[in-house]
Image: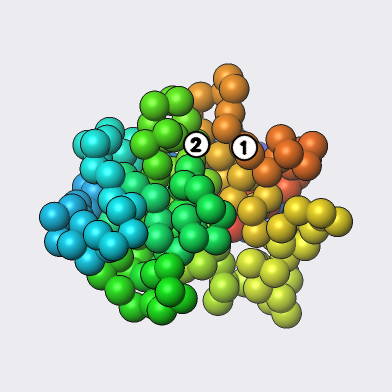
């Protein structure tokens, strides 16, 4: 017969085992996502950057401090993917050329220019347009682009213990397979749903355009992937 202290110890051990299993396989993301703090944000020398891309007139800077303020609210759980990442208020040169207009946001790990060359001064940057700031959508735009950074920097060489034959990135992209939309963009939108600190009128451009919804199970898998791959 168990005494009260022994019974309590046994229940505590069982609870810990079950919780660990949930975290690895299908965790409750809201319990395992670290609280939001105000991490330091790398600043970019807009003067030098403007000189580098002045021929494309893409660096705005009017809302640079607003963009940095939004960037400082990125959840701590996503920060491991952003080492050395700089945030720029403006229109990314390559994306602007491709779209013919200024994208709300762009993540650029390679420093691409409008002439299809890369390795430029703006390598490892997240760009946020002035329009995104003015319309109050900057926080969701930043989370979407941070989602791309997480996938690029953390998910490629990370594996769930019970599904080690396929990377976390590939498993998640399978969950966002769609006949018309780019799965990578849908996955990035899922970061907005999973990690936004507000719930009203989320800016999820690809979810909205393609009438897509991520299930609770998929969002739990996404949070689990962030927890696992950022360790």
Name the residue located 55 percent from the left edge and 61 percent from the top edge: 98
Task: Tell me the colour scheme of the image.
Answer: rainbow
Q: Position of residue 103 (x, y in %)?
A: 49, 47
Q: Taking 85 as reference, is 112 above or below it?
A: below
Quarter of the image with the C terminus is: bottom left
Q: Position of residue 195 (x, y in %)?
A: 52, 39
Q: Position of residue 50 (x, y in %)?
A: 21, 57
Judging depth in this view, the residue of 210 and 225 nearest the camera is: 210
Which labelled disc corresponds to residue 204? 1
Which labelled disc corresponds to residue 47? none
Name the residue located 49 percent from the left edge and 36 percent from the top edge: 140
Judging depth in this view, the residue of 52 and 229 nearest the camera is: 52
Q: Is residue 207 visible?
A: yes
Look at the numbered discs 1 and 2 and tell me whether their residues touch, using CB distance below 8 Å: yes
Q: Position of residue 79 (x, y in %)?
A: 37, 53
Q: What distance separates the C-alpha of mark 1 from that of mark 2? A: 8 Å
Which labelled disc corresponds to residue 140? 2
């Amino acid at each position: 017969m168990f005494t009260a202290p022994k019974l309590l110890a046994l229940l505590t051990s069982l609870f810990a085992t079950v919780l660990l299993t949930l975290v690895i396989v299908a965790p409750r993301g809201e319990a395992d996502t670290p609280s939001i703090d105000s991490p330091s944000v790398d600043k970019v020398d807009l003067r030098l950057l403007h000189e580098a891309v002045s021929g494309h007139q893409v660096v705005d800077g009017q809302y640079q401090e607003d963009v940095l303020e939004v960037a400082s609210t990125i959840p701590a759980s996503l920060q491991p993917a952003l080492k050395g990442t700089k945030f720029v208020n403006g229109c990314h040169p390559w994306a602007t050329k491709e779209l013919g207009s200024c994208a709300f946001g762009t993540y650029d790990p390679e420093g691409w220019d409008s002439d299809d060359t890369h390795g430029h001064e703006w390598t490892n940057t997240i760009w946020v347009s002035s329009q995104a700031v003015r319309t109050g959508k900057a926080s969701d735009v930043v989370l979407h682009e941070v989602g791309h950074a997480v996938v690029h920097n953390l998910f490629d060489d990370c594996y769930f213990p019970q599904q080690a034959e396929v990377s976390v990135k590939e498993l998640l992209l399978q969950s966002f397979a769609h006949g018309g939309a780019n799965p990578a963009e849908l996955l990035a939108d899922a970061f907005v749903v999973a990690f936004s600190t507000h719930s009203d009128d989320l800016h999820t451009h690809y979810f909205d355009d393609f009438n897509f919804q991520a299930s609770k199970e998929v969002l739990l898998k996404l949070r689990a992937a962030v927890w696992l791959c950022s360790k």
